Image (cartoon, rainbow, N blue to C red):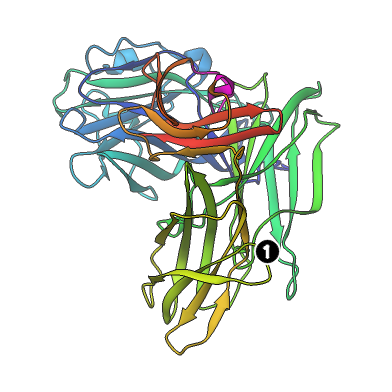
Amino acid sequence: MKTIYQFVYALLIIFAASLSVSAQCTLTEPAVELNYVSGNGGNCTVNLNLSFTIDRNNGNKYTYVHLWSPLSYPNIDYKKAPTAAELTSSLLATLAINTDGVASLLSTYSADPDNVFPLTGLTITEEDLGSNISRITIDNIQFVVPGACETLPILKGDVWSTQAQSKNPPVHCFSKGFNLSINDPLVAGIINCNDPDGPRTYDLDITSTNPIQFPIEYKLYLDDGVLTGGNATFTSDDQLIYTSPPFNLSASTPLNSKNEPYTYGNLEDKRSIWVVVTAPSLPNAIVAELKNNCTTTLPVTLARFSGDLLDDAITLSWTTTEESGSSYFDVERSADLSEFIKLGRIQSQGTTSVTQHYNFMDKSPLKGNNYYRLKMVDLNGSSEHSRIISVANNSNSVSFELLGNPVVNREIRFVLKNESVKNARLYDLNGKQIHFKLNQSGNTFTLKPYSNIPTGLYILSLGSDKGVQTKKVLVP
């Protein structure tokens, strides 16, 4: 059988049904990453990774995930732990997780011991997002779905938690009825190194088995270079570098882009690219990574260097993902790109493979354009300059900068200068607008959504006659 599902891509799940959260714990953002599908007689074997975000507290010592085909979804009332009869005989599988302490997999679920995944081959990892929030990921989940792979259905899933392991404990929080679309459209691509001189380019393919055209859009984000467990992750610090025009996708009209150049700075050419595909006809946003396997031999790997006008000062920030014999960074500024002066010095970490974050504030920026670069000096005295960035400080310069990310108490604070706040909008990653109220103190604004939005990434957008600026906001 010719398999067309050989792409590995991540699918960010937006709830397709109700979300219920108690005061004791929260479960949000269930997501699926397809590894492969293959024919199994008249059925289809699916191998995937599943993840979700959880508020770690005493209300969720034990967490369970159930999967069904949509036609057999039972729509359970989660006042108590579901019984085997409520889960129904058509249940595809159950994952049982101990979230009390270090997350681990359980071999049984007392109410339905026959349908728990065997632990062989499964791995579980946990990412600490701060503020008692964790991202739980279970890899290498494999099970059989009735029906051939060409007509693989959307799966439905429930996630729920309790603080007791008894046979019928009370449920403290749950997310039910979310869709797991794992077959269409497909996103794949690569980053072309073009060594030795570059520049980096990318290939991108978005395909569908749907014979009828439907409009899609996609955005490209340059990864911030910060690794979690050795892997890149899509976060609020990733940099938007491209927004596509609408494209009509179908089986006969795939999207194929080859050798496309993209914007990155000197010493920033090791960062991956995230592709986020949305469409009015899709219940979910599709997120895929174009991995960057290119190599550099520099003693400092600079993942990001950026500057922002923050009221009457300019903040500079940069991130390194690897340092080898590094001594310090000199921050240099110029008014005309011909002569640079040193503003200050920041000591580096020396030799480390752990991601490091650095910041510097220019409290007296020049009027007009300010040009900045970093002089990266090694312990042996050799040095290398970063790319040059420009930050405008004019009387009419727009200042738009987040104050804290992730946000605190679901309140988004930002500085806005020389632009109307009436043009500010907040969206989830599926494009749904979130309504909010605003409080102002000088150039500082506090945005608070009217509804209790779930944990996740959101887009804060500011429109003007010069275009649209966006900030990715992480709500823990």
Q: Nearer the viewer, residue 472 or 388?
A: 388
Q: Which residue is mark 1?
A: 336
Image check: 123 left or right of 300? left
Identify the residue at image location x=81%, y=43%. Answer: 256
Residue at coordinates 47% horizontally, 72% vertically from top-left? 330
On the question of residue 154 being in view, the answer is: no
Is any part of residue 109 visible from this angle? Answer: yes
At x 81% / y 24%, what residue is drawn? Answer: 211
Q: Amino acid at mark 1?
A: Asp
In the shown orientation, is residue 323 left or right of residue 391?
left
Magenta residues span 422-434
**Residue 345 in the image: x percent, y percent?**
41, 71
Helix, strand or loop at mark 1: loop
Q: Nearer the viewer, residue 348 or 442?
A: 442
Percent position of residue 374, x then y: 53, 69
Q: Decide which of 52, 114 is in the foreground and name it.
A: 52
